[in-house]
Image: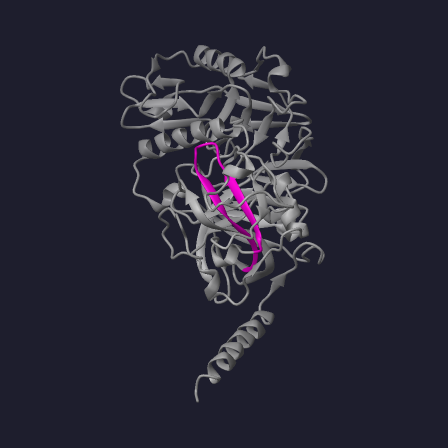
Amino acid sequence: MTEPLVPSLMAAKRSLLLCLLLLLPSFAVPGHGQPSRGIRLELTHVDARGDFTGSDRVRRAADRSHRRVNGLLAAAPPPAASTLRSDGGGGGACAATAAASVHASTATYLVDFAIGTPPLALSAVLDTGSDLIWTQCDAPCRRCFPQPAPLYAPARSVTYANVSCGSRLCDALPSLRPSSRCSASASAPAPERGGCTYYYSYGDGSSTDGVLATETFTFGAGTTVHDLAFGCGTDNLGGTDNSSGLVGMGRGPLSLVSQLGVTKFSYCFTPFNDTTTSSPLFLGSSASLSPAAKSTPFVPSPSGPRRSSYYYLSLEGITVGDTLLPIDPAVFRLTASGRGGLIIDSGTTFTALEERAFVVLARAVAARVALPLASGAHLGLSVCFAAPQGRGPEAVDVPRLVLHFDGADMELPRSSAVVEDRVAGVACLGIVSARGMSVLGSMQQQNMHVRYDVGRDVLSFEPANCGEL
């Protein structure tokens, strides 16, 4: 006699939870207008959650930077639709083939949020170099890497919903670089049947495979976003540096920025060696700078979907001391085929300069420092100097460095250009060499409030004490 009451109790529970959602502050998603107020989030440096020495952190940052840049440069051919999965499914109306070229496992900053109703607290990599928001899902999970929080289970949330095949959101996937298709296979996990499935591969061999869905996300101090599209990954390889997935901030239609409908966002990274102070991220109207901020336009992305999510800048030259270096501006130019150029990136710690420019810079810095070169192999850096006898690495006098962008000069203070190993007594230039493109890394952006105005296609920046914003 009690069995018929169970569905009624479940329905009542779902109704109560949905009513409670209406009491929370919320944002609209695409098609419902731009949020009227901004969001402030706190970013945590990935190494703040581990017990690392100063040299350990530099080494880890260098490793991540090299892997990240190699991933950004990766141009692996897209997998065929018939080999995307092992469940026997094939292409359909939503089928597309492509491969992402960013790294999932090179996190620099993590962002906290909650997903579902009731909410489950998670953290994910903040990535300006990709678009898709995704987290590991227990639906069930066929392959999942370790994460600090419990897996998100769609069946336990009353606000989870599959994205239908052929919908606007599903159609947005091919322009992202992952591949998608309709899933009708009876062997697919229940959440995937009849839905829009995706496969997103990264340059380091990691990948996420699952279904595109919508869910309620909670950011910051109770700011709720309904019906946010995300990837519910049930077959994931690799890892995301002690987090559950990624939050894409790129220029594509499924990034957090695009889905919120905000036209600008900003961040301010606290110093590289500060392991206790979080870094603020502002979304929407709260992303404001002073009138003294400098601005430079974004360079239009190359045609085609391969790199449409990246934020390209026009770097026109570099000054060391008072001397403009003899670097051909073409070294930093983005070609129509998508080669070259310079992007600004949250996931790369140390700025990477195209090799021809890096060699000129390294020689100019070495000539002006006039101290013996030292090995930085243990740190993963190549331009290092031994401290003067009886003194620490802070005594290494590195010349002024200025990056000349289109319409704006970015002068790097010593703390944004040099990393020190006090045990080894060396100071190293926090810039690495790359072949094929250049990347403005997060260390060179530290203690600088940086705003992406995606509505006007302009990047603005100004010095700031990020820990006090």
Q: Is the residue 254 above or below the residue 447 in the image?
A: below
Could you tell me which residue is drawn at 48 percent across and 42 percent down?
85
Q: Nearer the viewer, residue 464 or 146?
A: 146
At 52% across and 68% down in the image, what residue appears?
A: 158
Q: Is residue 236 above or below residue 27?
A: above
Q: Which residues are magenta?
A: 194-216
**At which x and y percent is residue 68?**
47, 31
Apparent side of residue 366 relative to residue 460 in the rendered image (left or right): left
Identity of the residue drawn at 49% across and 59% down? 190
Residue 224 vertical placement versus 458 (above, below): below
Number of on-image labels: 0
Q: Residue at x 60, y 34 (%)?
A: 310
Closer to us: 313 or 423: 313
Label the magenta part by its dominant secondary structure: strand
Where residue 344 appears, as percent x and y from the top left, is 57, 32
Regarding residue 306, the answer to whether it shows in the image is yes
